[in-house]
Amino acid sequence: MSTKSSKGLNELFHDTLKDIYFAEKKILAALPKMAKAAQSPDLKAAFEKHRGETQEHVARLEQVFEAIGEKPAAKNCPAIMGIIDEGAEIMEEYKGSPALDAGLLAAAQAVEHYEISRYGTMRTWASELGLTEAGSLLDLTLSEEKETDEALSELAEASVNIAAEAA
C-alpha cells in the first residue's frame, strides 16, 4: 500500500530552485572551456559574455533563495550534466574541425533551451505561490536566457553554420 507524500508546489519550487542553481554553477564552469575551444572570435565573445550573465544568474538565484527564506543549496541535476557532457564530447570529437563551432553552438543552445524551460516553469510557480519577488527575479533571468538563445541563433545563421558547411 502506497502512502501519498505531503509535498506540494512549495517543495517542488524549492527542489527545482536547487536544481537550476546547480545547473547554473556547472554552466559557469563549462563556459570558459567552451570559449577556449571555440574557433570563431564571435563565438568566443558570445561565450565570454554569457559567462558574465551566468554569474549574475547565480547571484539572482541566491536572492530567490533569500526571498523564500532558504539558504542557497544545489541539488545534482542529471539533465544539465548530460547536456554538458555532450558539449565536452563535441569538443573532443570535433577538435580542429570546421564543424566544431557549429557543434559548440548547438550544445550551448541545448543549455539555453533547458534554462528557458526551467525559468519559465519556476516563474509561473512563483506567481501561483504568491512569491512576487522571486517571480520578478526569475522573469528577468528568463528574458536574458531568451536573448542569449536568439543571439546564438543569429550567430549560427550568419557565420558559424556557413563556415562548417563550406569546409
Image (cartoon, grey):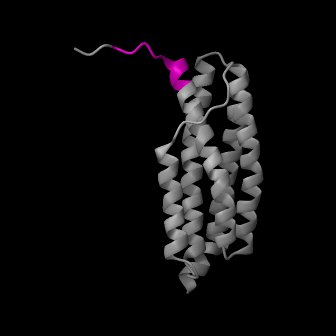
Residue drawn at x 68%, y 33% is: 138
Examine the image and state in which quarter residue 72 appears.
Answer: top right
Closer to us: 157 or 127: 127
| Left-right relation of 43 to 86 | right
Q: Is residue 64 above or below residue 110?
A: above
The quadrant in which the N terminus is found is: top left
| Left-right relation of 148 to 23 | right
Closer to us: 102 or 73: 73
Residue 69: image x %, image y %?
Answer: 69, 18
Q: How many marks?
A: 0
Examine the image and state in which quarter residue 75 appears.
Answer: top right
The quadrant in which the C terminus is found is: bottom right
Considering every residue shown, the one lying at the far bottom of the view is 167
Q: Is residue 115 above or below residue 154?
A: above
Closer to us: 153 or 126: 126
Residue drawn at x 67%, y 76% is: 39
Residue 28: image x %, image y %?
Answer: 67, 52
The answer to whether residue 8 is magenta is yes
Residue 96: image x %, image y %?
Answer: 58, 82
The answer to whether residue 89 is magenta is no
Residue drawn at x 65%, y 64% is: 33
The stretch in magenta equals: 4-13
Residue 67: image x %, image y %?
Answer: 72, 21
Examine the image and state in which quarter residue 37 appears.
Answer: bottom right
Q: Is residue 118 above or below residue 69?
A: below
Residue drawn at x 62%, y 29% is: 123
| Left-right relation of 31 to 59 | left
